[in-house]
Amino acid sequence: MTLLKVEHLTLQFDTDEGRITAVDDVSFEVNAGEVLGLVGESGSGKSVTAKSIMKLNPKNAIYSPQSSIKLDLEDEGVIDVLSLTSEKDLQVVRGGAVSMIFQEPMASFAPALTIGYQMVEQLLIHKDMTKKEAETHSIEMLERVGISDASNRFNQYAFELSGGMRQRAMIAMALSTSPKLLIADEPTTALDVTIQAQVIDLMKDLVKEFGMGIIFITHDLGVIAQTADRVAVKYLGRIVEEGPVREVIRTSAHPYTQGLLHALPKLDDLDSPLTPIPGDIPSPLERPSGCVFHTRCTVAEPRCNQSAPPMAKFDDTHLAACFVEAEKRGARS
């Protein structure tokens, strides 16, 4: 079942320096029980896209008329997210049917309130529970995500927990309302490798247990390879490649995706040098014409500067926007 459908999402911000395009004509779907990886460098618009699903972007955000974000909640019907305006209506996508795990839990937890107080507060808002029931459920969720001595941790403050424990508490808080869709914004970036592996395994177990959809945002294709079912690669606000994660990694069809893969260390050849993508991601105020990646692309042709390539089908489920690769592999428009 299609849980989330995003179509032609274009988002701009009015700033003192001018109007910035952060998300450019982005479309994707997330099914129940599926993990969609959203990959790209810093500045590619991953987090802005995720926040749009919860309408968390600041007031200077401008959505194009063609933008559409639809959430199918079965019992409650289809919700048009961008049409929601009141705080009460927005509670459906802000901690109710949709929850978000942020990159740095210390920026999400209020430092002067205990973990338990914050968990209970959201349950009283989103669920029909008494305070005692909310406390019991919160402690159970802390135990569920592997936090030892959960009843004592419940009464502690975020600064009293280790980085890995704070991240688990953030996951417990996000999951306590039983969301249909979980957005994980770089949840493993600040963690050491051992804790990263534990968090990834935990999220896999949660997908199986609760059947929720997950959008997993990261810049690390190695993490995506272990976590996601499908992956969408973003560059400067656009999705340049999308498909099943193994297919995209093994037969990447866009030069940007290929560049990200070549930049990864090779465990079977530790002496081989890393191959970075040349140049830097351009400023959103100075978006290149045509293909947004052509200023850094090693196979770019004159036409790449003149018009943006459409998404071409390399097979039924694997799409990429590249003139050169599409012709080389005989992809269908």
Image (cartoon, rainbow, N blue to C red):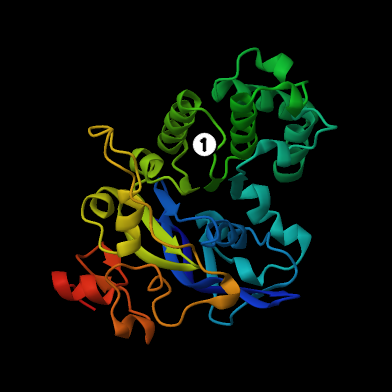
Q: Is residue 169 left or right of residue 117?
A: left
Is there any visible trace of residue 232 in the rendered image?
yes
- Front-lying residue, 117 or 324: 324
Q: Is residue 304 left or right of residue 162?
A: left
Asked where in the image residue 278 lies, by quadrant, the reply is bottom left
How many numbered marks does the figure carry?
1
Q: Quadrant of the C terminus?
A: bottom left
Q: Is residue 11 above or below residue 108?
A: below
Q: x%, y% of residue 253?
A: 25, 63
Q: Quadrant of the N terminus?
A: bottom left
- Residue for point 38% across, 83% down: 305
- Residue for point 34% across, 44% down: 264
Q: x%, y% of residue 101?
A: 60, 42
Q: Is residue 82 above or below residue 211?
A: below
- Residue for point 33% across, 39% down: 265
Could you tell me the amino acid type at mark 1?
A: Thr
- Pick out the residue farthest to the right: 112
- Pick out the residue farthest to the top: 149
- Front-lying residue, 222 or 156: 222
Asked where in the image residue 92 lies, by quadrant, the reply is bottom right
Q: Is residue 123 above or below residue 2?
A: above
Is there any visible trace of residue 128 in the rendered image?
no
Q: Secondary structure at mark 1?
A: loop
- Within 10 angstroms of label 1, few (less than 14), some, or many (20 or more) residues? many
Q: x%, y% of residue 222?
A: 36, 41
Q: x%, y% of residue 56?
A: 68, 59
- Residue for point 76% across, 44% down: 125
Question: Which residue is the site of mark 1?
Answer: 188
